[in-house]
Amino acid sequence: MSSLVKLAEVVDEAARTASAIPQLTDSEKLDVNQAYEIQALSLERRYKRGEQLIGVKMGLTSRAKMAQVGVHEVIWGRLTDAMRLEEGASLSRQRYVHPRIEPELAFLLKAPLSGEVSALEAMAAVEGIAPAMEIIDSRFRDFKFALPDVVADNSSSSGFVVGPWSRPDQDFRNLGVVMEVDGRPVQIGSTAGILGDPMRSLLAAARLAGKALGGLKAGWIIMAGGITAAHPLAPGQHVRTVIQNLGAVSLGVKD
Ligand code: 0L1
Ligand code: MG
């Protein structure tokens, strides 16, 4: 088997150059622990290029997403400052292989969080909640992968945008969500689409990513996971997600 370091270089180069690659599992026998090790090693390469870890994304947190990609397990990935897009920004389609976008809810932490925590303990660590969108861009050809592939590939994460922060002391378990492309609704759902309650995703982040990263840190953003299936991005589009009571977040696509 190739070394995990070598495989980390392969996924990192694919992400850096927006190039499609064959699935790692076509030629390697990998388990999920090895895949998370590849993810960590590939992110080390980005940190060496100056990127900073600023949070965590949770993935495959809704039935719609699990069905869309045929993987049925909650996964997580790392968010860096270079992945963050400004609200209302226009992204360049050429920077991605085959980008898709999905509506999410984001948490902003004001205190560290790690391990098995209760919902009350987790809430006490949350500064704000916001409508958000994630750009996922599997580096694997035709968006086809097995669980170890997608985990090694930073759980397909390649960008994210966060809208206005609201206080978390409100009921956000079942808020209506609409994602529009050029003013036309393309996905409709509810925040309950995230594991039945987005808080469950934050608890999973503390348990899974918190353990691997030595805790989730104050100031980090936690993307709770896709609420609906993801939508392909094409040049010229304007994408907007509105979450009931929380407001809107938008992005444009150029070239
Ligand atoms: O929900 C997610 O963010 C899952 C990412 C991995 C699967 C995909 O690329 O859609
Ligand atoms: Mg997502």
Image (tube, rainbow, N blue to C red):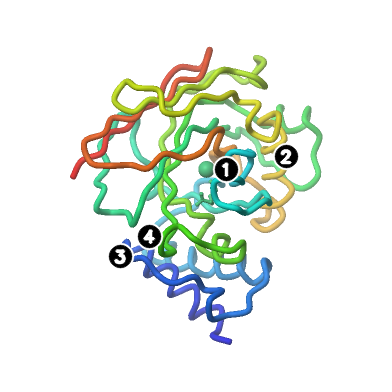
The label shown at residue 203 is 2
Give the residue at x 54% y 85%. 2
Element class at badge 2? helix
The label shown at residue 84 is none
Residue 105 vertical placement versus 8 (above, below): above
Element class at badge 1? helix
Q: Residues within 10 Å of mark 4 (few under 14, many from 20)?
A: few
The label shown at residue 65 is 1
Mark 2 touches mark 3? (CB < 8 Å)? no
State which tag comes first along the sequence, 2 or 4: 4
| Numbered disc in front, either 2 or 4 | 2
State which tag comes first along the sequence, 1 or 4: 4
Give the residue at x 23% y 41%. 235
**Callout 4 amino acid:** Gly
Q: Which residue is mark 4?
A: 50
Gap between marks 2 and 4, in whole Å?
29 Å
**Callout 2 amino acid:** Leu
Q: Which residue is mark 3?
A: 17
Q: Residues within 10 Å of mark 1 (few under 14, many from 20)?
A: many
| Numbered disc in front, either 4 or 3 | 3
Of residue 252 and residue 80, the one placed in the foreground of this image is 252
Residue 179 vertical placement versus 65 (above, below): above
Gap between marks 1 and 4, in whole Å?
32 Å
Q: Residues within 10 Å of mark 2 (few under 14, many from 20)?
A: many
| Numbered disc in front, either 1 or 4 | 1
Element class at badge 3? helix
Q: Is residue 43 left or right of residue 206?
A: left
Q: Is residue 132 left or right of residue 217?
A: left
Does the closest atom of ligand 1 sit within 8 Å of the Cβ of label 3? no
